[in-house]
């Protein structure tokens, strides 16, 4: 086996089941455009077949040292007969690669299911990947839980789904919100780059309410530049005249109005061909009754079906009773995915000191 840096052609041909937008040619381009140190490396066999691939990024630490990261995890067939030997070779080579580039640690977050679960976060029958967790720990990785990348997600499988039957399966209150939004003539449209302030403002307010940090405008713009049409920023808007009718009944609503429409909710999506991923979003709290957020999900679910996606990924959740975000996503029906989590491989004495100070976390954010 050989550990090498992959070419553009090789990266674009990658087709592993655990593939994801964080491990893509587009993301590699984005890092280059924003000046972030990054490498797309891989392991090849004697026949020049790529057995493993991974987009590695570096962030500065102290004393000229760096921490490397493989967000979205190594791309490989984790269920193959030679997984153990491949992981052993990969770990030794990746450690040396990072060491030569002043790395003190390497973080990875495999995009594979730890244990299969149902919609209510109960473990169900099926294959798990806990053996991979044990193998990584045997190789010297320390388990960190969710840390800086989501471990708990909520997904909806789309195989053979019919839009009408899908809608009927939504929870009753979700169907009612969507129907109300349609009666109120709420529209969902794509935001231009010049209008991204709408998403930023709404997502920032939602972040304060739900305890997550929304990204800055540079993130949104750089993602759009790298991914192009695969990225969509959408907004749900209510005709302002309908809002004014409500205000006339004695309620005071201080909201920005533009082109005769008032924003209700906004969101960012990534369509990588296999799945449609729902990333950052928010809704105007005072106007949630108009169903803007619900209508966005319904229209994007239909788009996922039309574009042939196999899965709709609602992304991060805290799958515990009473959590508002989890309850919202649960109403569209689906299941909880417990991913394997984040692991860190110390490199040298400084790396061991760095890793020793890190504790397991269950909720984080993507960068």
Image (spheres, rainbow, N blue to C red):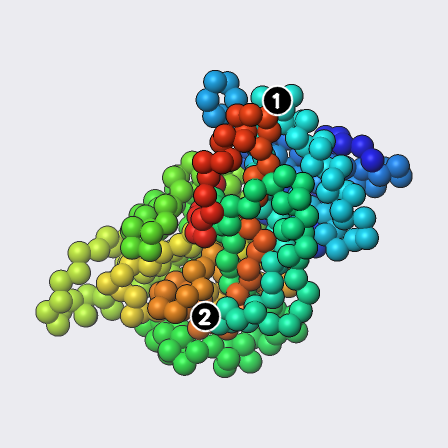
The span from disc 2 to disc 1 (Cα, nearest Å) is 44 Å
| Left or right position of 348 against 14 | left
Q: Position of residue 67 (x, y in %)?
A: 53, 30
Q: Which mark is residue 330?
A: 2
Q: Position of residue 234 (x, y in %)?
A: 43, 55
Residue bearing mark 1 = 101
| Left or right position of 180 against 303 | left
In front of the other: 187 or 224:
224
- Please report the residue visible at 76 percent of the width from the left and 32 percent of the height from the top: 3
Residues tagged 2 and 1 counted as in contact (Cβ below 8 A): no
Task: Report whether residue 73 is seen.
Answer: no
Q: What is the quadrant of the N terminus in the image?
A: top right
In front of the other: 11 or 336:
336
Image vertical order of residue 217 relative to residue 114, above or below? above
Q: Position of residue 24 (x, y in %)?
A: 63, 43
- Please report the residue visible at 19 percent of the width from the left and 70 percent of the height from the top: 246
- Please report the residue visible at 53 percent of the width from the left and 38 percent of the height from the top: 225
Q: Position of residue 102 (x, y in %)?
A: 58, 21
Image vertical order of residue 13 relative to residue 152, above or below? above
Task: Report whether residue 298 is seen.
Answer: yes
| Left or right position of 330 against 211 | right
In front of the other: 36 or 160:
36
Q: Which of the 4 quarters of the picture holds residue 90?
A: top right
């Amino acid at each position: 086996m050989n550990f090498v840096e992959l070419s553009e052609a090789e990266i674009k041909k990658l087709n592993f089941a655990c593939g994801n937008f964080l491990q893509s040619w587009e993301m590699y381009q984005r890092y280059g455009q924003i000046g972030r140190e990054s490498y797309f490396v891989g392991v090849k066999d004697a026949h020049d077949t790529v057995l493993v691939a991974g987009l590695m990024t570096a962030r500065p630490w102290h004393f000229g040292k760096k921490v490397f990261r493989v967000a979205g995890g190594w791309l490989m067939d984790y269920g193959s007969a030679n997984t153990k030997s491949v992981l052993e070779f990969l770990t030794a080579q990746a450690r040396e690669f990072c060491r030569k580039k002043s790395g003190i640690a390497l973080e990875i977050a495999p995009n594979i299911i730890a244990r299969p679960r149902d919609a209510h976060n109960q473990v169900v029958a099926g294959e798990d990947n806990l053996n991979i967790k044990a193998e990584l720990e045997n190789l010297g990785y320390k388990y960190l839980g969710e840390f800086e990348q989501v471990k708990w997600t909520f997904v909806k499988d789309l195989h053979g789904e019919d839009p009408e039957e899908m809608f009927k399966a939504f929870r009753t209150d979700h169907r009612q919100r969507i129907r109300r939004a349609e009666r109120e003539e709420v529209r969902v449209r794509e935001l231009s780059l010049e209008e991204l302030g709408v998403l930023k403002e709404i997502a920032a307010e939602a972040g304060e309410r739900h305890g997550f940090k929304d990204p800055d405008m540079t993130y949104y713009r750089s993602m759009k530049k790298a991914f192009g049409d695969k990225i969509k920023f959408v907004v749900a808007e209510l005709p302002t005249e309908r809002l004014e009718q409500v205000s006339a009944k004695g309620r005071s609503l201080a909201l920005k109005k533009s082109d005769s429409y008032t924003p209700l909710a906004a969101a960012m999506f990534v369509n990588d061909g296999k799945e449609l991923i729902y990333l950052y979003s928010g809704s105007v709290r005072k106007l949630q009754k108009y169903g803007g957020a619900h209508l966005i999900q319904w229209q994007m679910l239909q788009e996922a079906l039309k574009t042939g996606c196999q899965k709709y990924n609602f992304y991060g959740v805290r799958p515990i009773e009473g959590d508002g975000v989890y309850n919202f996503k649960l109403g569209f029906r689906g299941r909880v995915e417990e991913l394997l989590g984040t692991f860190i491989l110390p490199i040298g004495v400084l790396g061991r000191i760095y890793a020793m100070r890190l504790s397991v976390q269950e909720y984080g954010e993507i960068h």
